[in-house]
Image (tube, helix red, strand yellow):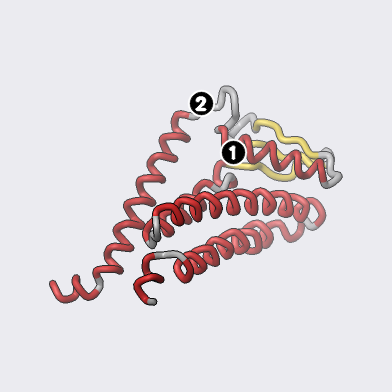
Amino acid sequence: MKTLFIKYKSVIKFILTFLLVYISFSVLYKFYLQFSDGSKFYPDYITHLVSKQTEALLNTFGYNAEVLAHPNEPSMKLILNGKYLARIIEGCNSISVIILFVSFVIAFSGKLKTTFFYILSGSVLIYTVNLLRIVILSIGLYHYPDYSEFLHTVVFPGIIYGMVFLLWIFWVNRFSKLKSRNE
């Protein structure tokens, strides 16, 4: 048993670090959501911000977009050219994906400064791509409502998770301590 532990020490360390960071950030995020009362920014600040930025981008692209607090659930209603199109929920704000990304990068950490800046720039990129994903998805839902299920459950999650996967691959091959050990 001890020889197996020694042989797979780096794998075990990665898994334990990943789980510890992921669970810690997820608990902190859960507390954030729990204490967001929605009185000023409904349903929570980040989801509200993503909704308002989506609205602004859609308006910039020539659509008449409006987001309103949903009266029956913690979400924002997206209205495009007078048509209720979708709702933006907490799961649309990219924070869960960023937590997953950060957990992996920390589990395969590199130099502290490099790790910090990669996490920061990667998180900004994920947030931005997610925002563009919502905008493009909204336009797709407006023009091609028959493909809504396919667009929402296959194409656009594939884009965001595919990008995160590529960021992970780039991190491991370029900056992680694993890379420096193999050179």
Q: Any mark on residue 28, and which?
A: none
Q: Earlier in the sequence, mark 2 or mark 1?
A: 2
Q: Amino acid at mark 1?
A: Thr
- Eyeballing the image, is 94 above or below 160? above
Disc 1 marks which residue?
47
| Residue shown at the point (34%, 72%) measured from the top left | 181
Residue 143: x %, y % from top left = 82, 54
Which quadrant would the C terminus be assigned to in this image? bottom left
The residue beneath circle 2 is: 37
Residue at image point 57% right, 37% down: 46
Distance from Cα at disc 2 to Cα at disc 1: 13 Å
Q: How many neighbours does mark 1 have within 10 angstroms: few (below 14), some (14-19), or many (20 or more)?
A: many
Name the residue rendered at 37%, 76% in the picture.
182
Quadrant of the snapshot with the N terminus? bottom left
**Going by the image, does 19 lie left or right of 37?**
left
Asked whether residue 100 appears in the rendered view, the answer is: no
